[in-house]
Amino acid sequence: MIDVVLVVSRGVRGGSGVVHGLAVVAVCALLVGCGGSSASAPRARAPSDALAERVCGGARQAAAKAFGSPLSERIVSPAAANLECVLTGRRVQVTIDSQAGPRAYTEFDTETSHQDQVFGSGGVHEQDQFPVQITVPGSQVAVWIPAQMLVVATDATPTTGGTYVTVAVSGRAAPAKTALRVATAAAGATFAAHPDGPS
C-alpha cells in the first residue's frame, strides 16, 4: 500500500486575487515504518547461486594460493550445467567453465580429440597445441594445452556422467609453469566443490 500526502498552499500575489495552488506530493512506499506499507521479503537465493558461490569461491582460494597473490571472483553463469566464473588478479585472469551432466566425458573427448587431430598426428604439428596428460585431483583424465594455457579435465568415464572442467589462464603475470600450477589448483578445487551430474 502507498500512502500519499497532498498539501495545498493558497496565496495571493500582488493583490490580484488570483489564487495559486501549490501541490506537494510526498510518497511513502516500501520503507520501514511507513503506515500501511510492508517491506518485501528478500529474494531467496536459488540453489544454483549457492552452488556457483561454493565452486567459484573454492577455485578462487586454491588459485590464489597457487598464484601467491589475492584474486577477485565474478560469477558469469551460476547454472550447474554451464557454470562459469572469472578470477582476476594483478596482470592475471583465470576463466573456469564447469559443466555437470551425462555428456561430461564426451565433451572432454571431443575437445582433446580435436586438438590431437588438428595439431598432433596428421595435423599441423604445433607441439604447444598438443594436449599433454597431467594429474588433476578429483579428475579421471586431464590434459594441459600449453599454447592456450588451458587445463581440460573430467571426473566422468565413458559410461558415467560427471563434470567437465576447463580452466584457462591468461595475463603477463602467468608464465607457463605458473599458469599450469594455478589452473591445476583451480580445476581440482572445482571438482571438490561441484556435484556430479546424472549418470
Image: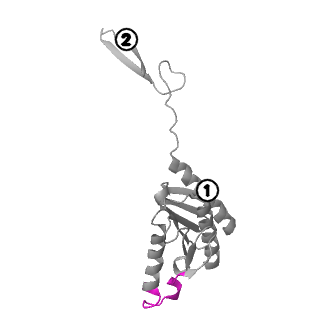
Residue nearest the viewer, comparing 67 with 62: 62
- Observer-side mark, 2 or 1, equals 1
* Residue found 39% across the figure and 13% down from its top: 9
Question: In this image, 16 relative to 35: left or right?
Answer: left
Q: CA distance from mark 2 to mark 1?
A: 64 Å
Residue nearest the viewer, comparing 145 with 159: 159
Where does label 1 land, which residue? Answer: 57
> Which residues, given as a range, are shown in magenta?
118-131
Residue 154 x, y percent position in the rendering: 54, 69
In this view, 58 is above or below 157 = above
Residue nearest the viewer, comparing 166 with 86: 166
The magenta stretch spans residue 123? yes
Residue nearest the viewer, comparing 104 with 80: 104
* Residue found 49% across the figure and 69% down from its top: 159
Residue 90 x, y percent position in the rendering: 62, 65
Q: Which mark is residue 11?
A: 2
* Residue found 51% across the figure and 32% down from its top: 41
Q: For the residue labelled by badge 2, is the local secondary structure a helix, a strand or a loop?
A: strand
